[in-house]
Amino acid sequence: MIRILLLFVLIGAAVWLAVWFADNPGRVEIEALGYGIYTEQVGILVLAVVILIVIAAALYRFWRSLRRAPGRIVEHRGASRRQRGYQALTQGMVAVAAGDSREALRFARKADSLLNDPPLTMLLSAQAAQLDGDEDAARRYFEAMLSEPEMAFLGVRGLLMQAVRGDDKTEALRLASEAQRLRPNTPWVLKHLLELQVSAKQWEAADQTLRDAIRIGVVDAELGRHRRAALAVEASRHALAQGDRAVAAKRSRQAHDFDPGLIPATVAYAKSLTDVGKMRRATKTLEAAWQKSPHPDLANAYRRLGGENEAPLALVKRFQRLVDLREDHPESHLALAEASLAAQLWGEARRHLELAAGEGRTSRVLRLFADLEEQESGDLKAARQLLDEAAKAPPEQSWYCDSCGSVAPAWHACCEACGGFATLEWRLPPGVPVAVEPLPAAIADQSQEWAEEKERPA
Ligand SMILES: [Zn+2]
């Protein structure tokens, strides 16, 4: 609008000027470098000057656009090249997702040649190489990524996955630690790092990782406490094996605090108390746990309270306390029956075995009955018959792995069969399909444990 008004004003001014010059004739003389221009028509001269200015302006614009042209052409060509590069990158990724290794490789090369951006194409090239089964080439790409700050994490991730697949746990652990250094709060990194630290038995480091995982909410706080208890039990056992009683005592107490229901934690804590002569507290701890859930491991720990040289009759007297605490539980009667057998109190042993068998003659009950037959009357035939029966008895509670279904002779934070962390539960075997394989081993382990138990002086 303003431009149109301006144009009218300009036209008006030009017309007025032309009319003015026509009405006021004059003379213009220009002399320069020996040439001269003389005119009486001033209006025409002004017009000529204006036309010249317009032509010069047009020429300048044309020259300017000519000068910019090459840059624009290059720019345009570059943009289309980039576009084709990204297209190849996208198609390559789709090929990777589709599992088409040939196409993936082809597009990876194309993207690489079109895009002058190695970090962007490295990942695709690595994935394409992996898809093609060329792990060495993939490794080279992943390693090249390490030197690009923004790609280093992806490089570490690729190498870590390679190490995990190749079952190279040492290398995997190193790479997981590196990944955690690069991005400390990445859930999958913490998960892998924790698993690898647990399987490397780096209990204290695993505990630190678990704490990080709980802090950022990857592991639920309640579950986290149970897991930390499991790690603390192992840390305590390790410290004890190293002869560091102070650390062992501290970690076992923490384990018990984290999860008072974890039997191995209670056992470890009671042991550390027993070791420093705090017998009353050890007794109280074990009795409290027994009241909640009687368990053979607790009975063993309770037996150790009396020391190596405790008289069998004294042990029977102490074990009566377990029956008093939980008279309803077969474990109480089994514990007292076993103590009575060692003290040669046959009648008492038989009575508690009958009570323990109230809910079914399990293999443990049958084995103790066999023991009784053999020791009391020397009836080997009856004893053998009972042992045969024991072998065929349905499985009973053991440390079963929730993950692989195998049975462990003793509790560990890490399943020795499948490496699962905190998967062992004291219970009846899981569903039949899982139990089919491990069952004979379970019974064998149980009897092995019994055999060892009996060899120990009461
Ligand atoms: Zn397992």
Image: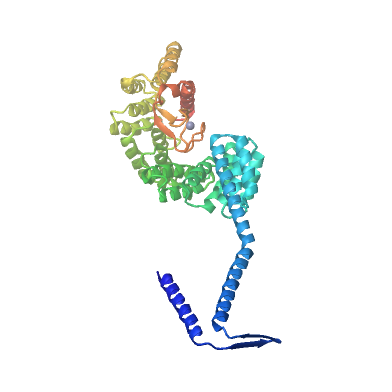
Specify the color scheme. rainbow
Q: Position of residue 409 (x, y in %)?
A: 48, 30
Residue 439 percent coordinates (x, y): 46, 22
Q: Residue at x 58, y 34 (%)?
A: 100
Q: Is residue 211 above or below residue 364?
A: below
Across and down, in percent, residue 294 comes to 34, 32
Q: Residue furthest right?
A: 34
Of 412 and 145, nearer the camera is: 145
Q: Residue at x 44, y 22 (%)?
A: 433
Instruction: Residue 66: tell me if it is visible.
Output: yes
- On screen, 355 above or below 302? above
Quarter of the image that includes the N terminus: bottom left
Identify the image quadrant of residue 387.
top left
Residue found 43% across the figure and 16% down from its top? 392
Residue 139 falls in image quadrant: top right
Q: Nearer the viewer, residue 391 or 371?
A: 391
* Nearest the eye: 181 or 116: 116
Residue 362: image quadrant is top left
The number of numbered discs placed on residues in the rendered structure image is 0
Judge whether residue 166 can be spotted in this image.
Answer: no
Residue 205, given in percent of the width and then of the height, sits at 51, 48
Q: Is residue 431 above or below residue 182?
A: above
